[in-house]
Image (tube, rainbow, N blue to C red):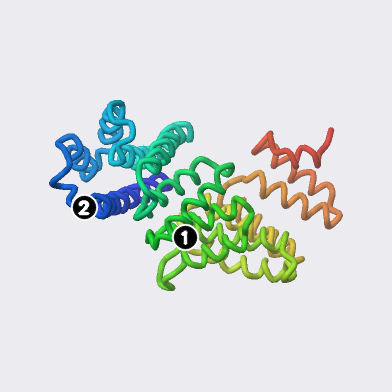
Amino acid sequence: MRSHRKQAVSTAMALTLGLLFMVFLSVVFIGWNNRLGDEKKFLLAAWESGDYLTVFTQSGEALQDKPMDFFLLTINGFSAYQLGIAQINSSGTLRYIDRCVWSLRKALLAKSPSNLGELYYVLGKAYYHKGPAFADLAVDFLERARSQSFQAADISEFLGLSYARIRDFRSSIASFAQALEPADREPSDLLLISIARSYMDLGEIASSYPIGEYLAMAKPYLIRCIETSRDSTTITKGRLLLAEILVKEGNTGEAEKQYQLVLEETGGNAEAFYQLGVLYAARGDTARAWAEWRRALRVDPAHKMARQRLGNR
């Protein structure tokens, strides 16, 4: 099910980016259709048909002769991004994303920074996909895109995720709030989980409100995610986070129910076993706690905390 959803999301994003790219070129290149050579018209046709590999390969070859051609650099970077998000392994994704960043940063050297909202947008998302160490650059370019009034359905969501990575949780929550607009929009599982996580993290560092108030703000998003998601992995993650909040609120009975539900739904989850052990240990039921930690290690022999709790037993 997850692979089908990922494919559907990638297809939708490909169509969206394809349309945005055509609009982008029509603004940057006034009368481009009459002025572009056959090679570039071929690349545009391939792009419109969704043949991103051909676009990427042919534009890369053309750049050997025209290394600072803005059109070639841009379409090469955009096609690299599309190929990157379609990969099934992280190494394949990173290879294309690195090329995307290289091409688009070079394109910025070839063009004045006006009417480049989409370029900033794709570059910002590319930096997000490069990982947490590049989150500050993701924020920088996504904010540049927004400063040029560029509109995309997922720009606020990516900004929220990127702000969370640099631990600016207030900006993260503000961006996520924008991502929830309009009110009738159906938020993604990732968005709901991310908002809750940002509230929880903000509660750990903020002094303006008691941590309990931030936890209370996080709970509805987790509950909604659990109730609406069709993805078992997301539901598990939501239940574990909700149980974490319940423990911090002192409601260990309800937390225990969430851990038990995780075990029922998954057939065995190392973190749920471990956390149940922590609950039982806090109640003084040491034997039951050790049993849960041993179960955690049977599911995941590398579970560090369970191994530490058991020691040499």
- Compared with 15, 76 (above or below) is above
Left/right placement of residue 114 relative to residue 31 reads right
Type of amino acid under label 2: Ile
Where disc 1 sits, the SS reads helix
Classify residue 199 by image quadrant: bottom right
- Residue 80, percent across and down? 36, 37
- Residue 177, percent across and down? 51, 67
Closer-to-camera residue (8/211): 211
Residue farthest to the bottom?
183
Type of amino acid under label 1: Ser
Closer-to-camera residue (4/39): 39
Tell me what residue is drawn at x 14 percent, y 36 percent.
38
Q: Is residue 86 visible?
A: no
How many numbered dots are placed on residues in this image? Answer: 2
Residue farthest to the front?
112
Alpha-carbon distance for marks 1 and 2?
30 Å
The C terminus - image quarter: top right
Residue at mark 1:
156
Tell me what residue is drawn at x 25 percent, y 33 percent.
54
Disc 1 packing (10 Å; few <14; some 14–19; many ≥20): many
Q: Earlier in the sequence, mark 1 or mark 2?
A: 2
- Residue 25, percent across and down? 26, 50
